[in-house]
Amino acid sequence: MTEHVEAVTFPGGIHPPYRKSYTKDKAVERAGEPEVVVIPLHQHTGAPNEAQVAVGDEVRVGQVIGATDAFVSAPVHSSVSGKVKAIELGPHPAMGAKVMSVVIESDGTETLHDSVKPRGDYSDMSPDDVKTIIRDSGIVGLGGAAFPTAVKVSPPKDKPIDTYLLNGAECEPYLTSDHRLMVERADEVVYGLRVLMHASGTPRAVVCVEDNKPDAIAALKKAVAGLENIEVTALHTKYPQGSEKHLIKAVLSREVPTGGLPFHVGVMVSNAGTAVAVSDAFQKGMPLIERVVTVTGSIVKEPRNLLAKIGTRFGDLIEECGGLTGKPSKVLMGGPMMGIAQYTLEVPVIKGTSGILVLSEEEADFGPTVPCVKCARCVDVCPVSLLPLFLAAYSERKMYDMAEASNALDCIECGCCSYVCPARRPLVHAIRVAKAEIMQKKRREMQAAKK
Amino acid sequence: MELERVVVSSSPHLRSPATVPVLMRDVVVALVPAALAGIVFFGYNALLLTVASVVAAVAAEAAYQKVAGKEVSVGDWSAVITGILVAFNVPPSAPLWLPVVGSAFAIVVVKQLFGGIGSNFVNPALAARAFLVASWPAHMTRWTSPFDAVSTATPLVTMGSGEVPAYADMFLGNIAGCVGETSALALLIGAGYLLARRVIDWRIPGAYLGTVSVLSWILGPRGIFTGDPLAHLLAGGLLLGAFFMATDYVTSPVTKKGRLYMGIGCGILTVLIRLYGGFPEGVSYSILLMNLATPLIDKFTGPRVFGHAK
Ligand code: SF4
Ligand code: SF4
């Protein structure tokens, strides 16, 4: 091994109740074929796609239905075979507004598109060809940020990457989709990682898993046995251990500079689920048309890990878990710390849907918001060492300049501060507002400078 | 399946079980041993003083909020704490109206007029103590011995002439002093509870007591390094102040480094006032002064932000 891997940790962070036992031992099962899928054309960070099909067209599994020439983007593919019923604005679980979506009625035959066939051995290909396949397969980061993977593995030439970190922390409570993938498909996780290393020219990799998943660690250790340049590291279980910057800090003791990205410190990070998607793209030729979704919560009748096709409605997956046993008060896409609250179950699974979490009324009721008592809990847990109480107070008073001067833009929106606040102050929300205002001001200034 | 009445709010969607009332109630629980010790050593009047003070604090808060048209927030237990602390800071022989006036002053003038919980810039109970000392100095300095209530002096006064009661008596609380400050044992039990429940952080009391120990040892009566740190720790209201008043969230720094400075500052001031000041008791004034410095300390002790240059 090259340099010594030192398991340091980062200051701050929290230990929320993890509540993973609902699903952590449940093997991934394929969800039933949806009758209809609603596939948003925009499921990633970057430029939206344009529809490549028309209403009435017959499409097959794996066929491109949305694409664009923009660099930062990823095409979308049909997850079913059937007929395009509509191309219209549809609900989206992550974007505030409705987005253009292709509605396809499945014919139930799951006929594959001609383009779906194994790609051969990646190690015979040039990194650029590998990147082209990654891009054509529509692969984006599956951890939630949905950044196009082909773009990610193409850092500036003058920034050599020495270490690839595979993020299997899955530090969000309730979620087990990555956990199950690592246990059940460890070989494919490692295969995908090796493809990613090849594409980015990275000599070594560390697979990072929180120590509350010993079965995943064991499976991965077995999968990397005999590989010189990949090791598996157990991480301390602590939220937000899965934050890219904190993962890098914990595993390599390197600190990504403010405003910087992992490649600034020679590191690349991808999620474990992303590696499996890459593996599928090469070994089966299957683009990203499905993913594992943890459907969970105390009032979900039978919580499960489901392999769901992109475009399947949340409501259908919840039905597949036996429905709900109580009144839902909140439905989230993602985990309870950073997940996005939904207002309808009509929203479809997208590439970034790691989980569907239903919270009951008791779970979602935190009690009233009262004045800040300056208990400093938010300060003690902030993994970025910010002073959240002051940032939020500046934001609430519209003092955005003060918020900017106090480094509001460094906030990773992990939610630790709001989680611990005994006064129930909406700290992250206020800081988000300040960040948006600061960014808007910056854009205005840049535009003014251009004129 | 449609969703009716779901909440669409910003993340996070989980919260820790600690709420403001839960934390405040923990502080009240932690003060109970000291209250019991006060009653054991000073008798019935100590109980009456405490009850009257708490009732006055809660009533003053509720009345003020009613009159001002604000939401009545006495359910958060913070007024109860203020009431107990005011009672703990008066002599056991004080007339009942003394802590009642003090509590009303603490709640109305120091807390509510500045905007209520979270907005006062000094600790209400300590401000009340200073107010009572200034207004009724005779009542506030009439010390009696435990059990027999005979007039006597407190260890801090006698310490000046080199006379210190037995450590065991000081530790148990069998000495003259305010209602709630004499029993180190009872205060430490409460403090241990607060630390274990993570209601308070070790930094302020740790730095405070550490500084007092070192400094009182160095600045001894018979030259350098001849002091009696143990007597200084056990005498007067130091433990009560260090664990229950200097740690008041609202009036102490929020940064980790700032909390250490708060403790060190309180420690230095306490020793200087005790050894060279006009009063024997330095704790309340030290904490009050450091309360005033708190915003400044917070301003200059912000931690290095992740990813920023060292
Ligand atoms: S945790 Fe809440 S109450 Fe405590 S200091 Fe932060 S904002 Fe204030
Ligand atoms: S301020 Fe931002 S980074 Fe710090 S705890 Fe709150 S959400 Fe996380």
Image: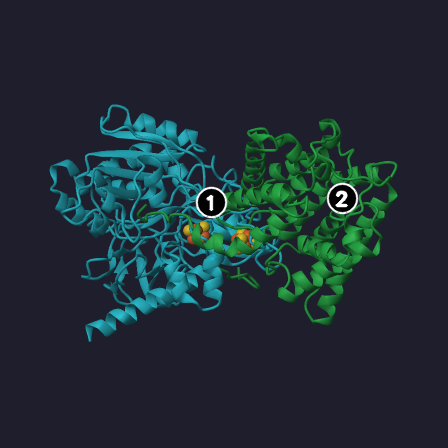
Chain colours: A cyan, B green
Residue drawn 38% across and 43% down? A242
Front-most of B289 and A187?
B289
- State which tag comes first along the sequence, 2 or 1: 2
Classed neighbour count for the residue bearing mark 1: other residues with Cα under 10 Å, few (<14), some (14–19), many (≥20): some
Q: Which mark is residue B178?
A: 2
The answer to whether tags 2 and 1 share a subunit is: yes
Front-most of A24 and B266?
B266
Residue at mark 1: chain: B
Type of amino acid at the residue the image marks with label 2:
Cys
Question: Picture coordinates of residue A357 (x, y %)?
Answer: 49, 50
Classed neighbour count for the residue bearing mark 2: other residues with Cα under 10 Å, few (<14), some (14–19), many (≥20): many
Question: Picture coordinates of residue A409 (x, y %)?
Answer: 36, 57
Can residue A149 be seen in this snapshot?
A: yes
For label 2, the SS is loop
Question: Picture coordinates of residue A103 (x, y %)?
Answer: 35, 63
Q: Quadrant of the C terminus of chain A?
A: bottom left
Q: Say if disc 1 is inside 8 Å of ligand 1.
A: no
Can residue A323 be seen in this snapshot?
A: no
Q: Is residue B246 left or right of residue B96?
A: left
Residues at discs 2 and 1 in contact (Cβ within 8 Å):
no
For label 1, the SS is helix
Residue linked to disc 1 = B257
Give the foreground label among 2 and 1. 2
